[in-house]
Amino acid sequence: MDVALIEQVRRFNRTVTQRIGALDDAYLSRGRPLGQARVLWEIGPEGREVRALRSRLDLDSGHLSRLLGALRADGLVVVEPDRADGRVRRARLTPAGRAERAELDRLSDELAASILRPLNGRQRARLVSAMAEVERLLLASMVDVAVTDPRHPHARHCLRSYFAELARRFDHGFDPARSISADDEELTPPAGLLLVATLHGDPVGCGALKLHPDGHAEVKRMWTAPAVRGLGLGRRLLAELESRAAAHGVHTLRLETNRALVEAVGLYRAAGYREVAAFNDEPYADHWFDKSLAPDSSRRSE
């Protein structure tokens, strides 16, 4: 990694933490550190499951328990079994907690205004635009991609969402039973694999490979959730599939797609896939692509 890039990120982190008051033991002069204030805000007016808080804030169980314990001691939060499922613990704000959250919102607005106030109109627009871009890139860096059993609930969620989107967007709907198969066994090593992307513990995308003994593989089940589109996740999933295919000795990747999926068509072309004649009888396909892969360097060194 470029040392200059690392140093710039560190400088940015130092500036931001100082400017927003993250170093203060009493964030926004409310007598508690930023971590406790953030938990109050994330619980929200409707309450939130403790496990969802842990995923959302990327905290381990012990740290979150300490934060919640301090807020409970101050009478701001209660943690109790969920009414729908007693096995699940849910945090909710007390009346005092709701009042404290409202005050934190007011003070946070004042802090944001104090950051913008010294700047002229053009500088404010530049800063807010830059913040939005940084937020998108930071979210992209927080997405985790891992090989996942297609039977896992996260995988099931992604595949159901993928099928539902195809059914909405294709001219005549979509029936998985009519399409060329990519079932659980075909997406499980060594026959293939399924990548699932998660953000804050929630599934937000997937992509799969069907491996064949003749040295080619098929890219299947490429999908990203609408909420994360624009973060480059589709390109990341495709690149990861290519890397894993090369590691398995694949020399050619193939895929087919429908003309309604204009974003997918653009992604494949931008990634170096060339349009070819139909190589299968997929009833939902309008475009067929392939790409030659360079041999994996780690395999060459063995």
Image: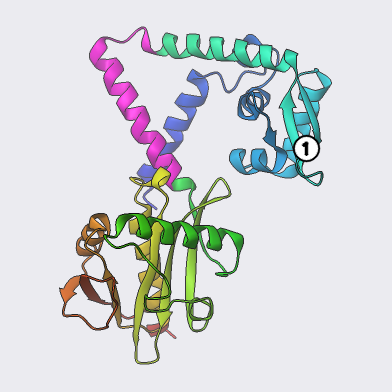
Query: Which quarter of the figure has residue 297?
Result: bottom left
Residue 256 left/right relative to 184: left
Query: Would residue 33 be visible to someone looking at this image?
Result: yes
Q: Is residue 9 above or below residue 185?
A: above
Number of residue marks: 1
Which residues are drawn in magenta?
116-140
Q: Is residue 131 above or below residue 194?
A: above
Nearest the viewer among 3 and 183 is 183
Query: Which quarter of the figure has residue 129?
Result: top left
What is the three-letter code of the residue carrying label 1? Arg
Please identify the residue farthest to the front as the structure is shown. 172
Nearest the viewer among 211 and 118 is 211
Nearest the viewer among 151 and 5 is 151
Taking the spot 59% from the left edge, 40% from the top edge, the residue there is 56
Query: Which quarter of the figure has residue 65?
Result: top right
Tell me the chief SS of the magenta region: helix
- Snapshot colouring: rainbow
